[in-house]
Image: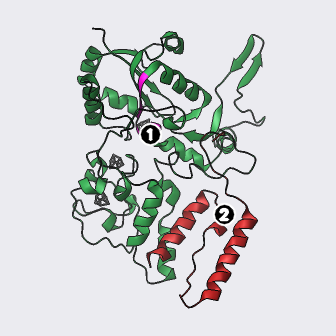
Chain colours: A green, B red
Amino acid sequence: MTKPKIALYWAAACGGCDVAVLDTNEKILDIANLADIVFWPVALDFKYHHVEEMADTSIDLCLFNGAVRNSEQEEIARLLRAKSKVMVAFGACACFGGIPALGNFTTRDEIFERVYIESPSSANENRTFPQTLTKVEEGELDLPEMFDTVMTLAQVVDVEYFIPGCPPPVDIILKVVDLFASGQLPPVGAIIASDKTLCDECERTKEEKKIARIYRPHQIIPDPNRCLLEQGIICCGPATRGGCGVRCVKANMPCRGCFGPPPGVIDQGAKLVSAIASIYQSDGQEDINRMLEDIVDPAGTFYRFGMADSMLKRKSLPQGERRA
Amino acid sequence: MKAARRIPLMKKMLAQFGIEEERVRLDWVSASEGDRFAQLVNEMTEEIRRLGPFSGNGGKADD
Ligand code: SF4
Ligand code: SF4
Ligand code: SF4
């Protein structure tokens, strides 16, 4: 029997998802024994044209990490989709936009302005920006086009499975490999994690959820046994899917929400607004104002990983400037 | 009175999304204030008409 073929790709990603695959340590050799890795830019020297030459649906499993924010990533997502039987959004960026999708609070022009003009290390009096096409003596050079809006993988191509996490934990990666090897993958569309919320899986003591002040993580040394939210630290557990092993909270850090919304929650940020505002104790407008001051960056906090997947998806673009 | 805290927090967040503040309004009307209720709804309708339809965001341009 020929071995199944696996492809891995990174789009708008930090590399952490690829490292998570390598973190399977000696198990990576089992994966290599079990399957032929036919494309993996971070580790193997295959080029795009190798993928183009493959027959359609000849790749059995594609683990795609990273969000989609430029034309190259979109093109490769479509290419890998055509060549793969099973497409997996791997990691928070591919599933929900992740950290790159915080860029949806700005626009391409604003990002270029910041990076190429305003940043203290730039000296760019001629206002030179990257161009998609540049003519030089030898011919034309082209660069991918950056989009205004960062997208999830599923906003670009059909996706069979979602593995959340920033990055996905090793035990979930191994579980997926096992399910794949034994032909027991769940129904299409499944999110491979828990069906509970993180709070359901968290063992900290929970009493009455009431807070009178919000602390940012660096302003307080939290009690390692009590619910962090009850101590006034914004923990996204109530609006986050479980399955990560409660890893941040166990390290005494609040959950930032990288497993995305739990079943039944459409918009993670809206759910968090509701959850946090309801437990805040207020006697009047003054207290409400203090809460508003304490929560310095609600959108960035509540959609830290979920901006591209949220109902609003991005900051409004000025009229007439809508483009992909 | 959870709404009294949720709405201001949501408004602060919607401002970060560039959404006009006037699109969300929280007011208190008692069951006996029918006229005031009608007046508030009319004001809100006028306001939204002035702002025009909310344009969807993000995703593909052809969504
Ligand atoms: S999900 Fe996290 S680890 Fe993976 S690419 Fe995105 S930022 Fe990096
Ligand atoms: S809010 Fe955070 S600390 Fe509290 S129970 Fe939920 S996950 Fe645990
Ligand atoms: S605790 Fe929250 S932020 Fe940390 S890994 Fe789990 S889901 Fe992600």
The magenta segment is A85-95
**Which residue type carries mark 1?**
Cys
Give above or below for A125 relative to A77: below
Residue A152 spot, x, y in % from top left? 51, 39
Residue A41 in sight: no
Tell me the CA gap for discs 2 and 1. Answer: 29 Å
Tag of residue B20: 2
Q: Callout 1 environment at 10 Å: few (<14), some (14 to 19), or many (20+)?
A: many
Q: From what the image shows, is residue A12 above or below residue A273?
A: above
Q: Is residue A53 left or right of residue A215?
A: right
Q: Chain of mark 1?
A: A
Q: Residue at x 47, y 50 (%)?
A: A304
Chain of residue at mark 2? B
* Residue A54 visible in the snapshot: yes
Residue type beneath disc 2: Glu
Residue at image mark 1: A95
Residue A103 percent across, percent down from the top left: 57, 45
Q: Quadrant of residue A130?
A: top right
Tell me what residue is drawn at x 67 percent, y 73 percent.
Answer: B44
Residue drawn at 74 percent across, 16 percent down: A140
Q: In this image, A309 relative to A256: left or right?
A: right
Q: Tell me where residue A181 appears, x and y as whole percent.
A: 26, 22
Give the quarter of the figure containing the C terminus of chain A.
Answer: top right
Where residue A108 appears, x then y in whole percent?
A: 66, 41
Task: Give the class, few, some or many, for how many residues have Cα within 10 Å of label 2's Cα (few <14, many ≥20).
Answer: some
SS type, badge 1: helix
